[in-house]
Structures are given as C-alpha cells and as structure tokens.
Image (cartoon, rainbow, N blue to C red):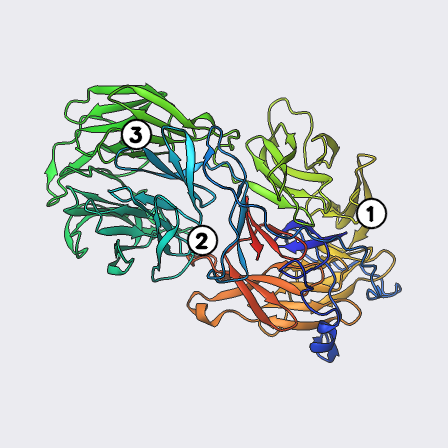
Amino acid sequence: MRWLALGFCVAAVVGCRGLSGTEPLTDPGAIDGGLRATAVDGSSDPTGRADAASDGRRGVGPAKETGDAALPMCAPLQAPDTGTDVVSITGWSPPTVAPFSCNPMPNAFFFPHPGVDVPGVFARCASFDDAQPTALAISSDGSRVALTGFDGVARIVDVGSRTVVGVLAPARASVGWAAFSPSGDTIVTIAPGERLVTLWRADSFTPIWTTTLPGQTYQLQYRGTGVFSPDGATVLVSPGDSLYLLDASTGAIRVASTTGAVLNAEYGWNGRRIAVLTAQLAGMCEYDPTGGSVSILDPTTLALIATPVTWPLTSDESPPPGQMEVAAGADLIVTRGSETASSALMAFRISDGGPVAAPAISTFPLALTPDGSAALLAEGGTLELVRLADGVVTASAALTQPEVVAISADGSTIAAGSTGDSLLTTWRPASGLLVPTCTAALTPSDGATVQTSLSADGATIAVNLGDLIHVVRRTDGTTVSTIAYDQDEFLGLNLSPDARYLVAEFLDLKPGSSSSGPEVYRTSDGQPVANLQTDILWPLFFSRDDRLLDGLLAYTGPGTTVMQANFDMGKVTSGSSAPGYATLVGLSGDCPLLIDANGTLTRSCSGCQPLPVAKNTKGGLVSLDGTMYLSQGGSTDPMAAVLWNIGSAPSVIRTYSPRPEDAIWNVSETPLAISAHGERIITGAREVASCSHAPGFTSRVRDVASDAVVDELPPGPTSASADLSVVAYGPVLWCAR
C-alpha cells in the first residue's frame, strides 16, 4: 500500500498512473536516466528513483544530540520493498442532471466532463457538500431562486415545484454570486477567486459569454457583488476588491474603478445611482476590512457623487466595518457604523447623499423592500417586515435567523437561506404563505470547516459534516457508513489507504464523553476500535497492512519516542526512540525520518547513529519508501522548494525557485504534495512575512522528469489520490480529464 504526502496533513495513496488514468506519469527509468543531482556534500551523483510518500504536521523543537560515536552510522536505504501498487479508480462519474428535487438537496453533485474548449489538465468533478447557501438571488417575479453554496455551485430552484431546474457550475471556477436579469431570460455568475464573470441562458443554462476581470487571481476576497441594472443593459460586479460595469450583451468592461475592499454595492433609485460600501485593510498580522465609508456613484461612469458617511480608523483593528442596505426602487440608503457596536442607524438619500430621518427600528435590517417602505428583520425566531416610518410590524412568519436573504424586484417574494430544514425558505408576505422550499439532510456545525480525506485509489472520501463523519463512494455518492462522535472541537481526519479505518482528531471533550484524544474508527460500521490517548501527538502514518499506525509521536523526558498503534489489539505500544525533540516527517523502511531544529533530516534507526540525508530545510514531505523528500528550502535558495534523493545517495534532484512574476510579494515556493513514486509533485507559494496580506497563489502540478508545469490549480489542496489524478479542496474534487 502507498501513501501520498500532501501539505501538512496525511492522505493515503497508491501507485502512480497517468493523469488520464491510463498511462504512467513517466517511463519507469526516465528519472534515473534523465536527471542528475547534487549530493548533500556537494558532489554530483545520479538521482535515485522515487517511489511513494507520506507526511505529517510540521513542528520544530530544540535539537539534542544523543548519538554514540561507538555506534555505526545508520545505513542508507537500499532497494526498498515497494509493496503492491493499487490501481486508482479513474474516470468521471455520470454528471448530475437537472431537474431534481431539493427536498432534500442531494449532498453529492457530479460535474459534467469538460469539453475540449476548456483549458487545463484538471477540472472540477464532484462536490460532497450540503449546498449551504453563501448567497441568494431571486427572479423579478419571485418564481426562481439562485442558491449559491459553499461549494461554488449555483443551483437554480423553481419555487413552485421545489425542484432544482438548472445548475451553473463552471469547470474551473468557483461561483460566489449569481443574479437574474430583469427579464429573467439570463443569469450572471461571478467567480471571485478566478475573477470570471459568465452570462448564462436561463432556459438551457448554457453560457453566452465569459469575461475575465483584470487583477490578481485569488486576491483577498470580501463580499463583493453581482447585480443587473434595472434596465438590464449593464451588470455591476465586484470580486471583492474593485468595481466593474459590464455590457450585459457582450460582457465587455465599460468602466472599472479601484475602490479597496468592496463589502457591498447595489443599484438604487431605480438604477439612477450606485451605492458602494468599502473598507480599508488593517490589522496587526491578519488584515481585515476595518472602518470604511459609503460612496454614491454615477451608474454610467462610476464617478463619485457623494460620500454620506465615513468611519475613520481608531486603531489597527477598529472599528469593525460598517453596514449598508439600499432600497432598489427608492431614494434611500440605511447604514450603521459597526456590525458589533450598538451605534444608531442612519439614513441618507442615494440621489445626493443628504441625510433623512433615521428609521424607526433598532436592529440593522437584513434587507430593505424595493420601495423603501419597510425593513426585513429577524427577531426571536420570527421573520418580520417592519415599516421604517413608525416601526409597525406589517407581516411576520415563524423562521429562525437566516444566513442570507433576497427580495424579488416586485417585492412579492422573500427568499431566506440557512441550513438543515431551512436550507431555502420562500415567503410571500401578502398571503402569509411561508414555504420550506429546499431542505438539507445534513447540518454542519456552526462555523465549522467541512474537512475531508481521500482513500489511496481516490474511490472513497470521508466528509466531516455536523457531528457525523460520512464515508462516501466518490464515484456515485453512495454513503458507505456514518461515524458519530461525542467529542468537541473537531480538528481533522484521515482515511487509511484502503478506507477500512479512519482516524479523527479532537481538541476537547463534550460533557459526558468517555474518551479523549485521536480516535480510530472502523469505516464498515462506524464503530471505534482504538483510542490513541492524549499524550500521543500527530502526525499519524498508516502502515502498509492498514492495521497499524506507524509514526505516532510521544515526548518522554528529554527524548522523542516513536509509537505504534495496533488496531486489532486496540492499544498503543512504544517503538524506537529518537534523539532530542525531533519532528517526525516520514518513514524510511522501518526507520523514522526526523527533522531537528536546524532543519537536518535524519534517518534514525534503533542501534545506530542517525544518518543525515538532507540539511538546512524547513520541513517537508517524504515518500513512503524513504527515498524522496520535497522540502522547504535546503539548497542555495532558502525560499525555494527542493526535491531530494534521500535513498542510497542523498542529493538534490531539483530546486523550484520562487515565482518571478510574484516577486512583489516576496514569496517562497512551498511543498504541497508528492505522488506515490515521486514523478509528480504539487508546489504552492506563500509570502514570507510575519504579517502578510498577499493573495492566494496557484498550486502548480509539476512533472519532475521534464520539469514542466502540467497545470495550475487553486490554492490550498487538502488531500489527493495516489497518482494526483484526484485533488480535494475540502468537499470539492478536481479530477484529471
């Protein structure tokens, strides 16, 4: 069995096959025959051949020498046992075809295979999220709702039939906003990270045009916007850092305006003005929107007309950004100075920025009705329409606090999005009709990130959602098992290579829980088989037979002990000892590979002195057979990612220098993943600064033998299959085509 090293988490993997799933990544002898390397001592030496990989979290503690000069030096790894490769499950699943019921909404969505016109080797192939909405848009007559989920897919819901009638899912971009045209015959989507705007037909859900916005991809993203003008001639869009007016018929950019972090922008006064809420980026180390202002712009030129309110900075981190809502068909803006402060609400004319009487409400509204007469509030489990003039409740319905809302242009229908049974609710205040339009079978924990792990062959994915871990077949979305846990602060999970076992890590216990520490579960029935105790520190490495975990760390006195857990026996036993407070990054045969505070990677076997195999690194990823190490630094350029042969002849194979096109950010190239045999790797980039506000940088899939960049994927992959043909971004998967 094989593992894949990925980032600083563990992903089980197997042998390499080509990204198409039918051809090897390289000829078996290509690396040996085509590359030369520089040895650790500076001499030239042919490279060894990579085989497989594993990794763990990186941590650095003080080094301590405990070697005995009388002991022999640990021998280099010779002819490692590569084990039996497991063939990856390749190919694409049949796509999800609309229409389908959203009661409940399916948790699995399968993207169509991209056409030849779509660039790149990879494309999004599946999502295993619950479609919890991040944004809603509603058609002018309230008959349809565009529900944009955390997975970057816009699902078009027919309200009357409670059916998803169309899905807007770009092959290589994640949608953050959607908006209906006034006539309802087209829909626009905005993918903020990729800075792509696409216009779709509302009948066939096929694209009409796509426009790429200028600027840095994966820039720090804020709320942004996407909305048609009332006459349908233009589209106002923002990926979160600038404003653009696009021609609705062609997608051409008419006007662009750099405005800082855009938190909201809306048409008002029947399209005769635009109001935009912006904020400065400030903070000690994490840069966030702070303070800000409301500006009124000309809808044709984006020229500034007035700035009715500004919230100046009082420190690096305060005040929090202000809030703004606009009445689409009236001469009205309502603002408040801070999300958290109890500051009073203010109101202004959008025509000229002049002040008007403050609304007779104390809570900042979720939205304003188009005619500006009322505000939508959520109070104590009730959704209310409240008149701004006198605070009288004109309509109400029982509904808990929604995450996002939208009001139709005719004011007849309100859409509210949340989780679980309230995934999408529609309300017609005039008739009092409240309809739970779409539901979700699963409800994620409040504020929790959906975490996932792929099996070696890429056929199984484990998804943590709510208080359950779902083990799912990737190919068809069938649930294999669910694992319930009673511990709090879920931190991470890892499937064993063949998906028979799963390890979940927790921080704290919930009241009444009977166990603590990382827990091992059997995926066939969801039952726990071993508790790994609180003094065991990750990383965890699944062994080849999947019954044992090699590489548990425990700090015992002045040294580090490598522990082993036996699933069959359900207990943890001590293994070999290591010098000092080292950090385990992988295995080399039966010997741990540890890195000390000086960045020296050593092969530390029992009964011999540790053998240095790489120096001056800052951590990295090690292949399963212990012959390949993808490190941060370690060559002449500490900002580079370095690929080492650490087998029979320790040496540098390749150095991946920082990206010259991103030199303004002072970035380093960083290791993200290595395939089972090391023929392909993934590297990312990050700014080297204690306080960074750099954008996200693409993840580059590289062929080692040719030194070619095969594809550029989004930042931050979280797991992958053995051959890197399936790459996970939480619950969303990208597959090789």
* Whole-percent x, y for residue 58 in the image: 63, 53
Q: Residue at x 19, y 20 (%)?
A: 392
Residue 314 left/right relative to 32: left
| Residue type, numbered disc 1 | Gly
Q: Residues within 10 Å of mark 2 (few under 14, many from 20)?
A: many
Q: Which residue is mark 2?
A: 173
Q: Which residue is mark 3?
A: 414
Up/down of 637 relative to 174, above or below:
below
Up/down of 161 relative to 204, above or below:
above
Looking at the rendered image, the disc whose residue lies closer to the viewer, 2 or 1, is 2
Q: Name the residue nearer the viewer: 723 or 40.
A: 723
* Whole-percent x, y for residue 677 in the image: 72, 62
Q: Which residue is mark 1?
A: 575
Residue 482 occupies quadrant = top right
The mark that comes first in sequence, 2 or 1, is 2
| Residue type, numbered disc 2 | Ala
Q: Can you say which quadrant of the picture contains the C terminus?
A: bottom right
Residue 632 left/right relative to 321: right
Q: Residue at x 35, y 43 (%)?
A: 203
Q: Residues within 10 Å of mark 3 (few under 14, many from 20)?
A: many
* Whole-percent x, y for residue 522 in the image: 73, 34
Residue 269 left/right relative to 580: left
Q: Note whether residue 713 is visible.
A: yes
The mark that comes first in sequence, 3 or 1, is 3
Q: Residues within 10 Å of mark 1 (few under 14, many from 20)?
A: some
Residue 431 occupies quadrant = top left
